[in-house]
Amino acid sequence: MPFFLFATAFEVLPILVLVRSSLADEGGLGLGNFRRALTPMMLRSFGNSIQISFVTALLGVAFGTVVAHAIVTTRNATLRSALTALADVSANFGGAPLAFAFIITLGSTGVVTLLLAAVGIELYPEFRIYSVAGLTVAYLYFQLPLLILLIIPALLGLQREWREAATSLGATDFQYWTRVALPILAPSLLGSFLLLFANAFGAYATAWTLTGSDVNLITVQIAALVRGEVQLDPGLADSLALLSLVVMAVCVAGHQWLGGRVRSRAT
């Protein structure tokens, strides 16, 4: 009962209020806010958010899986525990502090930028931390460790006997990974990709602190419509938030479904 009351107060009721506010129109209920949410500028913001979420999720899965495999296979238990703890901390480090950290290190006068300039490597103006490329680097800081934490249990589920059986049948390492390991890991990898996509899609503080309004993301648009003095429009913001909620709900539902397949296969 306490959990039911908590979920109702902090999850169900806010969603119902959001739906009611997004449907509020002149003289009653209508879809006017959703029609305005599908203007070219808002669609571009959705497109930019989807693009950066897709890229960071894909890179997170690609590189994070390699790092997670290295952590799992290391024989040093202390190093394995330390790297797992580091991934746990890094996955929860985001928002404005992360943006400021990247400004200090990779900004136009950042520490790493000045050190590279001292050895003849000029990052600017080809690379800017305040651009989409810089935002992608910042997102990867918390996307990679999150993927590591998500995929480690799946990697631990790979039985040593499977590799030994494949080797005894003449399979190479490449054949083992492409025909045995990756098909087994596919649901976990795809589910983790969906979760990383939702994680990046809903990020706001890092993007706003690092790039401001230079990068047109849907979360930045929602914040500008809620607290802006010039373009204050809560109804439009609620409709955009509801559409964003649908995107993230689809990702989370896909992750749960794939997780169920993994559990059923394990049993």
Image (cartoon, rainbow, N blue to C red):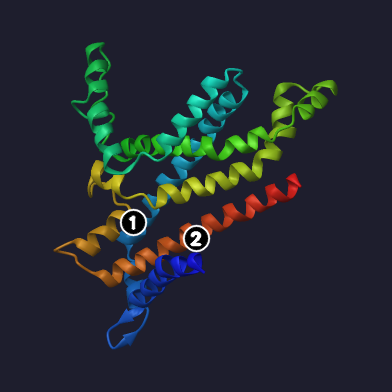
User: Which is in the foreground here, disc 1 or disc 2?
Assistant: 2
Task: Please give the name of the residue rendered at 59% of the width and 35% of the height, measured from the top-left corner.
Answer: 152
Q: Relative to residue 206, is residue 17 depicted above or below?
A: below
In the structure shown, which secondary structural element does the residue marked by tag 2 occupy? Answer: helix
Name which residue type carries label 1.
Ile
Q: Rounded to the nearest whole Å, what is the CA distance between mark 1 and mark 2?
A: 16 Å
- Location of residue 225 by image quarter: bottom left
Q: Relative to residue 217, is residue 132 depicted above or below?
A: above
Name which residue type carries label 2.
Ala
In the rendered image, the residue lying farthest to the right is 169
Residue tagged 2: 249
Task: Please give the name of the residue rendered at 41% of the width and 74% of the height, measured from the top-left corner.
Answer: 16
Whether residue 64 appears in this view of the structure is yes
Residue 206 in the image: x percent, y percent? Answer: 30, 44
- Location of residue 110 by image quarter: top left
For disc 1, the neighbor class at 10 Å (few under 14, some 14 to 19, many from 20) is many
In the rendered image, the residue lying farthest to the front is 2
- Location of residue 114 by image quarter: top left
Residue 77 in the image: x percent, y percent? Answer: 57, 21
Q: In this image, 65 relative to 210: left or right? A: right
Whether residue 125 appears in this view of the structure is no
Residue 182 in the image: x percent, y percent? Answer: 68, 35
In the rendered image, the residue lying farthest to the bottom is 27
Residue tagged 1: 218
In the rendered image, the residue lying farthest to the top is 119
Q: In this image, 67 relative to 55: left or right? A: right
Q: Are marks 1 and 2 in contact (CB under 8 Å)?
A: no
Task: Please give the name of the residue rendered at 59% of the width and 54% of the height, measured from the top-left corner.
Answer: 256
Q: In this image, 102 relative to 173: left or right? A: left
